[in-house]
Image (tube, rainbow, N blue to C red):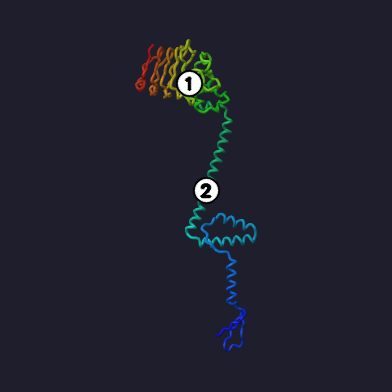
Amino acid sequence: DSYNYNSRSQRSITRPGAVSVVPIDVPQTDDIYASTRSLTRSAAPITCPTSINIEDLNNSISSSVSSGSDAARSSNTAMRNFKFFWDIMPPKSKERARVRRSGSVTVVLVWVFTGAIVAGLVFFLRKGRRAHGRVSPESFLKELFQPYSGILNDTTTAQYKACQWLADDPRALEYHHQQLTQRYALASMYFSLEGGNWKWRDDKRKAWLSESSECEWMYVSCDDIGNVVDIGFRQYQEPTGLFGSLPREIGLLTHLSSIEIEIDPGLAGTIPTEIGLLSGLVRIDITDTYLSGAIPTEIGLLTLLATLQLTSNSLSSTIPTEIGLLKDLDVFDLSL
């Protein structure tokens, strides 16, 4: 076959022995080159991304679909572009994209979990506060001290009176546990020993059962953080006026290191066994009273005790062998 090209965009093909010539429109080489350059210049350059935010792409697709058919076509195009970019993305870039996506999900889950915990705590705290507001101070105090005293329903006991006095204090539920316990124990001692008849010898100190801190009450001393460490009804010119017996609630004063009662014949009864709970006691000095009965064996638990002076009392029975456990004991006097 022979081919003859004319100057226009038309080419004739002539075959030997052919009856007719069929003209075919074929673009010339120059036209093809020009068209190719035009397309190349108008097209945006293709770059290989290093990472793709999948969540942003999904959000973009969702908003596009909801906007109409044009947006749907745009989303389809974006998805095709994403697939194309993902296919040509290097393996390391794909891995970084997966890590970023999993990290974002983890952060969101952590925030959701933390928010749920905080919301739960707030709910239960408010619920507890509302429930606490419905409980009367008297019921709360009875529930707190009933396991120890066990006689708070008898209105004639010193313990009931102490609990009732504390319940009438408008700040009763504001005290921390240690202060609440100390005030209850001291109030029990006050009512057990008829505190209304005591002699007040120091105008600078406050009366027992006053609204002031128990550390400011007469005959009471505290350490720097408000723990009662000393109770001293010491002899001045006349007896203090104690009348009754030491209550078992003295065992609640767990920071007590010294107790002294001098020349108070109105003090009778026995030494409560709960004194063995006062592991920090260093000095017991109870002289010239009418204490009776035996020295409790629990005295052997007071391993820090250095002075045990119980002179001029009405104690009976034998000396407990547990005294031998007191390795720091320097003064031990039971003389009459």
Up-down: is 189 above or below 53? above
Q: Which residue is mark 2?
A: 107
Number of labels in the image equals 2
Residue 8 percent location from the top left of the image: 62, 80
Is disc 2 surrounded by few (<14), some (14 to 19) or many (20+) residues within 10 Å? few
Residue 271 place in picture, x, y as percent = 43, 18
What residue sits 49% from the left and 16% below the top?
A: 193
Q: Quadrant of residue 297?
A: top left
Q: What residue did someone put label 1 on?
A: 221
41 lies above or below 99: below
Locate residue 228 relative to residue 306 in the image: left or right.
right
- Looking at the rendered structure, the secondary structure element under dot 1 is strand
> Mark number for residue 295?
none
Chain-order first, disc 1 or disc 2: 2
Foreground pick, 9 / 252? 9
* 96 and 32: which is toward the camera: 32
Q: Position of residue 187 (x, y in %)?
A: 51, 20
Report the residue at 48% width, 25% height from top.
224
Residue 163 x %, y %: 53, 23
Which amino acid type is shown beneath numbered disc 2?
Answer: Val
